[in-house]
Image: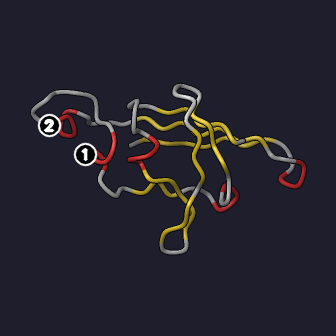
Amino acid sequence: MVAFARTAGERAAGEQAALTVVPRLVVGLAGESGGAPLGRGAWGDTWLVLPEELSLAGFRNIFTGEKMQTGEREGRPGLALADVCRDFPVALLVRE
């Protein structure tokens, strides 16, 4: 998985943020079906760790319209890839 975040503005003033998420080396994830790597079957419990400034953020996936909230695992903010890539193999998430 390759992911990067871009932020702009003052955090206190409602900082804007975009998060791009794209899988790599997907042939091994596709399995026998050869389909796109989607959901828990492909990503299991893989966690996408986010920068601290994006903790407690809500995001909307531009491609699917899905909304998701960051969680915390082992004291670090992030998102479950099974949720991020549930219905589409890439994501462009914008902060809500």
For the residue carrying disc 2, how many other residues have a C-alpha within 10 Å: few (<14), some (14-19), or many (20+)? few
> Residue 69's spot in the image, x, y percent?
60, 52
- Under circle 1, the secondary element is helix
**Does residue 60 appear left or right of residue 31 in this picture?**
right
Most foreground residue, 46 or 39: 39
Q: Which mark is residue 31?
A: 2
Q: Which mark is residue 41?
A: 1
Tell me the CA gap for discs 2 and 1: 10 Å
**Does residue 82 appear left or right of residue 44 in this picture?**
right
**Does residue 20 appear left or right of residue 83 in this picture?**
right
**Does residue 13 appear left or right of residue 58 in this picture?**
right
Q: Which callout, 2 or 1, points at the residue further toward the start of the chain?
A: 2
91 up-or-down from 49: above or below:
above
Residue in view at x 58 percent, y 56 percent = 70
Identify the colour scheme used.
Answer: secondary structure
Q: Amino acid at mark 2?
A: Gly
> Residue 51's spot in the image, x, y percent?
61, 57
* Circles 2 and 1: CB atoms closer than 8 Å: yes
Residue at the farthest bottom position = 74
The N terminus, quarter of image:
top left
> Residue 60's spot in the image, x, y percent?
62, 37
The C terminus, quarter of image:
top right
| Mark 2 or 1: the one toward you | 1
Q: Amino acid at mark 1?
A: Gly
Q: Which mark is residue 73?
A: none
Residue in view at x 80 percent, y 46 percent = 15
Residue in view at x 59 percent, y 28 percent = 62
The answer to which image quadrant residue 16 occupies is top right
Residue at the farthest right position = 13
- Under circle 2, the secondary element is loop
